[in-house]
Image: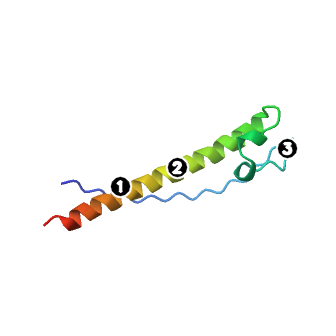
Amino acid sequence: MLRLKINFRVRRSVRVKCPRHPRYNPEREGAGAIRGGCRYCVAIYELYAGKLAVERSLQALEQQIARCAVFNVAAP
């Protein structure tokens, strides 16, 4: 039998802006809108992509936990 107790809470607020391209928004424009390989815009996009990866991982974990909970309820 495996018991897991997972408490996970992250609260982080980051406001970053490229000094050369202050209107760049990775959420709306994506990586294709980075002009001339600007290192600040690339770093902003990588930060955003990392956030999305963490959210996807947590969602996958929640789905796995839900599947296991269904198995435990169904077993006599």
User: Which residue was labeled with disc 3?
Assistant: 21
Of the two numbered discs 2 and 1 on the same chain, state the one appearing first in sequence. 2
75 over 22 or under it: above or below? below
Of the two numbered discs 3 and 1 on the same chain, state the one appearing first in sequence. 3
Amino acid residing under circle 2: Val
Query: 14 or 29, which lies in front?
Result: 29
The answer to whether residue 24 of the structure is visible from this angle is yes
Amino acid residing under circle 1: Gln
- Residue 5 in percent (x, y) is at 32, 59
As measured in the structure, the alpha-carbon distance from the residue carrying label 2 to the one carrying label 1 is 15 Å
Residues tagged 3 and 1 counted as in contact (Cβ below 8 A): no
Q: Is 9 on the left or on the right of 11, as rendered?
A: left
Single out the residue that lies furthest toward the top. 37
Query: 28 or 47, which lies in front?
Result: 28
Please tell me which residue is depicted at 62% across the width and 45% down the height of the picture.
49
- Residue 3 in percent (x, y) is at 25, 57
Amino acid residing under circle 3: His
Single out the residue that lies furthest toward the right. 20
Q: Residues within 10 Å of mark 2 (few under 14, many from 20)?
A: few
8 over 21 or under it: above or below? below
Q: Secondary structure at mark 2?
A: helix
Mark toward the viewer: 3 or 1: 1
Q: Secondary structure at mark 3?
A: loop
Residues tagged 2 and 1 counted as in contact (Cβ below 8 A): no
Of the numbered discs in the image, which one, if any, rests on residue 64? 1
Q: Is 12 on the left or on the right of 59, as rendered?
A: right
As measured in the structure, the alpha-carbon distance from the residue carrying label 3 to the one carrying label 2 is 26 Å
Of the numbered discs in the image, which one, if any, rests on residue 54? 2
Q: Secondary structure at mark 1?
A: helix
| Quarter of the figure with residue 11 | bottom right
Mark toward the viewer: 2 or 1: 1
Please tell me which residue is depicted at 80% across the width and 48% down the height of the picture.
24
